[in-house]
Amino acid sequence: VNSPIVKSTFKQLGSVEDGWLVEMYYRSAVAYQQAVYGVAANEFGNLAKRITALEEQRFRKLQELMLAFVPRQRRLLIALPENFKTVLDDLVGLRIDEESLQAIIDNSIRDRSRDHLKRGA
């Protein structure tokens, strides 16, 4: 609880023996928590609405771009000479697994580090 009123109230509660006063402090603490919860729920609701609007906008823009891109890509691929068909098939059929890619990256980093250390020495 960040409210200084509620903090000081809880410090004072240890010395209060009046049941009505303790209940009043309790009710004011509950009211404060309900108010804070209401504000937080409202802010999260507004945030969710903004995120939803941004996602809808992103989806619409992406859909427009894809609708423009796919026919262009189809025309390009149809216009490619038959000589490039085998190259294109090889590229489409090429599969790179994560382990071999990681090994290539590691080897490249290792080689560059060695070269860098040789130049520095």
Image (cartoon, helix red, strand yellow):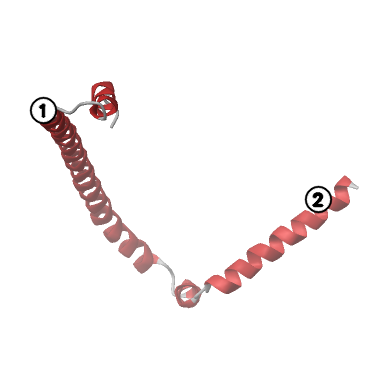
Q: Is residue 118 above or below residue 21?
A: below
Classify residue 106 as left or right of residue 15. right
Q: How would you rate the neighbour count of disc 2 (Cα within 10 Å): few for under 14, some for 14-19, many for 20 or more?
A: few
How far apart are labels 1 and 2 at the CA level? 73 Å
**Residue contact at pointers 1 and 2, CB within 8 angstroms:** no
Q: Residue furthest right?
A: 121
Q: What mark, if any, has residue 8 been given in the picture?
A: none
What residue would you read off at disc 2? 116
What residue would you read off at disc 1? 24
Choose top left, top right, bottom left or bottom right for residue 78.
bottom left
What element does badge 1 sit on?
helix
Q: Which of marks 1 and 2 is in front?
A: 1
Classify residue 101 as left or right of residue 64. right
Choose top left, top right, bottom left or bottom right for residue 21.
top left
Question: Label 2 is placed on what type of residue?
Answer: His
Classify residue 45 as left or right of residue 93. left
